[in-house]
């Protein structure tokens, strides 16, 4: 029996060796070696800048309520590789993961023996999703793109049941392009000939133009999901529940409480309606119950309530603006302590401008990533916008300092800035909570 450590080592080494290669040639060759199992599956393909993972979580919960065998593939992993592959909300087991990776490694070896390029780690991981979900006989697969859309390995799939495009904003500019127009074109690359497209209604005319022109060129039907259809948005029970009304469904309650989740929930509601039109028995009760039960760790997720401790993966300007709105709508009477760690390829100065006016105290850290901004340098930037900033050389020091301040002042703690450090911070914070009990 192959150990998980061996599989992890193989993938980590592959990540170092292969880097990032955009394009579909290698994934097509790999899937041919695996019998093109993706052609046996039905997909909801999800692209966008922010909100992809949350929409996937909402849709998964809705389809589970409808009794549909649903596979969900998301990336990147935040708290562990296995969470990227879920059937009916449950992670793939280590043994199942090892089996599919071993089969894919054999297929890669056959490719290289023929003189072909070895697939990248993301291509291997994506192939693993297709193989696993086919084996589990999933009726629908919720498939999140990795980077962009057009040249993303997930775009090898046949015409999906519906292509979903969440909000589009500036991110990954080194790869996708330096303009909103270029980024929108990359995201719109998932639109297939004659397909159905549901897009969160863009605020930027340029993005609308890209989507509409792409759909016209590909004879695809474009529908817009509009969060303005959600009415009476409010927080209840000390911001533990987010509620709104939606025509035809009545009262909707979300356990995912970032205010930006209203937009994502409406997108999921209207995607579920499309699936109903495609013949799937998704009823109103399934939608309401699924939205209420859905969870997505790392997106305004509450780790504890005494003190209130929230983790959020906001890592670009658009996400920071949405996070700020959440704080202003639901947490106006609380002192808020930030723990911030960011990556160098993100617009961190803009994020600081947006977020720091709402802070009481700020602790900066250095994520464990070669792309990380040094926490000491981040603290210097933060001092331009806030007086109470302190750099912590370790995550543990940041957790201890933040907890001490929060309990003394009855404040809440918000950790954000990059998904890359939330796993380590969550573990440290959990240990701190256990020590305090």
Image (tube, rainbow, N blue to C red):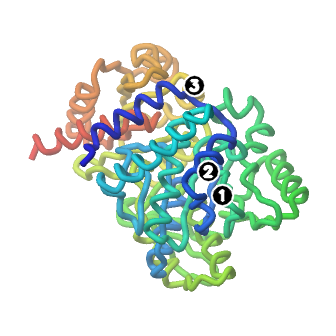
Across and down, in percent, residue 412 comes to 32, 43
Q: Give the percent coordinates (x, y) of residue 289.
A: 44, 77
Q: Which residue is mark 3?
A: 345
Quarter of the figure with residue 105: top left
**Which residue is located at x 27 percent, y 33 percent?**
402
Q: Which residue is mark 1?
A: 157
Question: Label 3 vs label 1: CA separation?
Answer: 30 Å
The percent position of residue 293, horizontal first and vertical second, equals 40, 70
Find out whether the residues at labels 2 and 1 contact each other: C-beta distance under 8 Å: yes
Question: Quarter-wise, where is residue 349 in the image?
Answer: top right
Task: Give the structural element (helix, strand or loop) at label 3.
Answer: loop
Q: Badge 2 is on which residue?
A: 154
| Left or right position of 409 against 72 | left
Instruction: Tell me the residue at 42%/24% (across/down).
Output: 369
Q: Nearer the viewer, mark 3 or mark 1?
A: 1
Helix, strand or loop at disc 1? loop
Using the numbered discs, state the Cα–Cα distance from disc 2 to disc 1 in whole angstroms. Answer: 6 Å
Work out whether residue 331 can be spotted. Answer: no
């Amino acid at each position: 029996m192959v150990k998980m450590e061996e599989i992890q080592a193989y993938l980590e080494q592959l990540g170092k060796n292969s880097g990032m290669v955009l394009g579909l040639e290698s994934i097509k060759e790999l899937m041919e070696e695996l019998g093109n199992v993706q052609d046996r599956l039905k997909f909801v393909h999800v692209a966008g800048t922010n909100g992809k993972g949350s929409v996937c979580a909402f849709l998964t919960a809705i389809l589970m309520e409808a009794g549909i065998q649903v596979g969900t593939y998301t990336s990147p992993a935040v708290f562990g590789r296995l969470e990227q592959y879920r059937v009916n909300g449950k992670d793939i087991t280590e043994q199942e993961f090892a089996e599919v990776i071993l089969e894919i490694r054999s297929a890669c070896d056959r490719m290289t023996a023929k003189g072909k390029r070895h697939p990248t780690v993301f291509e291997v991981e994506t192939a693993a999703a297709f193989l696993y979900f086919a084996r589990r006989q999933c009726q629908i697969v919720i498939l999140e793109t990795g980077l962009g859309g057009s040249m993303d390995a997930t775009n090898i799939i046949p015409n999906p049941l519906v292509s979903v495009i969440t909000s589009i904003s500036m991110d990954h500019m080194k790869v996708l392009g330096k303009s909103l127009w270029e980024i929108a074109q990359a995201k719109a690359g998932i639109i297939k000939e004659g397909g159905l497209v549901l897009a969160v209604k863009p605020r930027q005319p340029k993005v609308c133009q890209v989507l509409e022109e792409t759909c016209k060129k590909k004879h695809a039907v474009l529908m817009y999901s509009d969060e303005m259809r959600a009415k009476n948005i409010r927080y209840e029970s000390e911001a533990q529940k987010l509620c709104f009304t939606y025509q035809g469904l009545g009262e909707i309650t979300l356990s995912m409480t970032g205010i930006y989740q209203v937009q994502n929930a409406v997108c999921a509601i209207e995607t579920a309606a499309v699936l109903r039109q495609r013949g799937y028995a998704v009823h109103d009760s399934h939608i309401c119950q699924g939205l209420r039960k859905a969870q997505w760790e790392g997106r305004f997720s509450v780790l504890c309530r005494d003190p209130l401790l929230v983790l959020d993966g906001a890592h670009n300007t658009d996400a920071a603006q949405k996070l700020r709105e959440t704080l202003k709508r639901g947490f106006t009477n609380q002192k808020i302590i930030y723990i911030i760690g960011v990556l160098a390829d993100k617009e961190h100065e803009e994020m600081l401008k947006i977020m720091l006016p709402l802070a009481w105290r700020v602790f900066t850290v250095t994520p464990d990533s070669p792309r990380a901004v040094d926490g000491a340098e981040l603290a210097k930037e933060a001092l331009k916008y806030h007086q109470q900033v302190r750099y912590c050389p370790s995550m543990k020091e940041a957790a201890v300092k933040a907890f001490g301040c929060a309990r003394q002042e009855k404040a809440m703690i918000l950790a954000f800035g990059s998904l890359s450090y939330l796993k380590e911070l969550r573990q440290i914070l959990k240990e701190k909570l256990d020590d305090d009990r």
